[in-house]
Amino acid sequence: MQAELTLAGRPTPTLTASLGRLIRKPRSLGSALMLAGSRGLAVVLQFLMQLAVASVGGAAGVGMLQLLSSWVCIAGEAIALGLPARAMRDTSIDCANGNAARTRTMLMRARRSIGRAWLVVAALLALAGAVAALAGFSPVEHRYTLVMAASLLGAPLFALLRLYAESLKAAGGAVAAVSLESLTSPVAILLLCAACWLMKLPLLSMHLLVAYLLSLLIAPLALRLVIGNRLRTLATQGTVQSTQTTAPKGDLLFLWGTGMLSICFVQLPFMVLPWFATEAEIGVFALAHKLVNIITTLLLLLAAVYGPRFAQQVAAGETDKLRHSLAETQLISTAIFVPAALALLALSPSLPALFGSEFSTITGYLLLLVVGQLVNAITGLSGVLLTMAGQARNELACLAVALITVVIASFWVGPAYGAKGLAALFSIGIAIKNIGSWLAARRLLKQLETPS
């Protein structure tokens, strides 16, 4: 007898039932296949990018690129102020109601808010740097100064990329949004590596920084053009309904906190590892992290489709559909992750032959990281559901518990067990966070089903 999952105290659809629902939706299935194709190309390019950087720049080059992308993501999320997540939720509802003008106004205000936040942060950092210089104190190692400066320049570009990408996904342009946000950087880095190889030049840190920043400039500009066209098309169709989105009190603060803790949680290894590992060890871990994340970022495709759907179903009070949608994300993410992860582990012994002898220990890192991400896949998009349902407070709490647990434990695990011990700890943190989000989603669905 086929086992059933339980959610909110009621049985969710069986795997066969959920799969049947997807097959009966050819339009949704076609969109999903296009997204999968786009992401599949991104997977190939990400792999080639890691291979190219490792071949031309070595493990240190991989580590430097990872540190840069990590700090850009963290700084960008900080000045994004939670606006991308709210943009997805509000845009999905506004587009369903034909209210393109409201979305356009929201994007303009969000853009200004991001610009002001960046100016404040830049001024504060400049002041802090000047004070530190006068005091003869250097808060950052010299070799990382360039990375920090590039991160500050890339932060507003990353924030705008997130804002436009989330809005475009909600406006029905998920394929374009995912393609632009996932393909631009790999293409830029690959072109750089090809140029260095052809001209027999070394791959310097400055080269990587410039190429990455250039990709962050191109992507939001392209996304802005696409979302603008989408909104103009929407404005010419149908009539505007008067439905308004009602945000819970303090919603934006919780969205910002959730976004910050989410990005810090993802990038935490690269904030902790420099204290306990060499650049080469960081490079090996970074490659393992990237390879596993190539699979897990397929969940971003689900978020692009199901995030707006969650928001619309919550706004319409369609709790039964909401429950089925969450079950579908659990089914799809598990069905994608398990075979892909097994294939990656099976191929891992041959990776040192591709990337170099420095990566001979990568199989152990991959195994440790896969365990934590398996829990992530099984629990589906529980965290996205909480955010789209106005329950960012609960998602924030789950992230905070997991993050604090990992940070505190790092001070013992790092010195005692090194990089591999930290990899195991990071997987435990991922499991804690996702189990917490899933339990919170169960509780939310039960509350929504209970008559007031």
Image (tube, grey):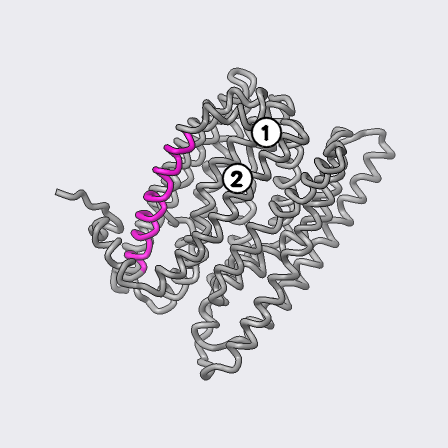
State the image coordinates of residue 394 (x, y, percent, origin top left). Answer: 42, 49
The residue that appears at 58% across and 36% down in the rendered structure is 50
Instruction: Tell me the amino acid under the disc marked 2.
Output: Val
Mark 1 and mark 2 lie on one chain; the one further toward the N terminus is 2
Q: Nearer the viewer, residue 137 or 175?
A: 175
Measured along the vertical axis of the image, is residue 70 above or below residue 415?
below
Which one is nearer the viewer's eye here, 397 or 218?
218
Residue 250 at least partly seen? no
The residue where tag 2 is placed is: 266
> Disc 1 on helix, strand or loop?
helix
**In the rendered image, which quarter contains the C terminus?**
bottom left
When the figure is inspected, residue 282 is found, relative to residue 231, above or below; the finding is: above
On whether residue 328 falls in the magenta region, the answer is yes
Locate residue 4 relative to residue 68 in the image: left or right.
left
Among all residues in the image, which is located at the extreme left? 1
Span highlighted in magenta in the image: 322-345
**Residue at 50% across, 35% down:** 291
Q: Which mark is residue 223?
A: none
Horizontal and vertical percent position of residue 418: 54, 19
Q: Residue furthest top?
A: 416
Residue named by callout 1: 272
Q: CA distance from mark 1 to mark 2?
A: 12 Å
Residue drawn where x is 26% and y is 53% of the image: 19
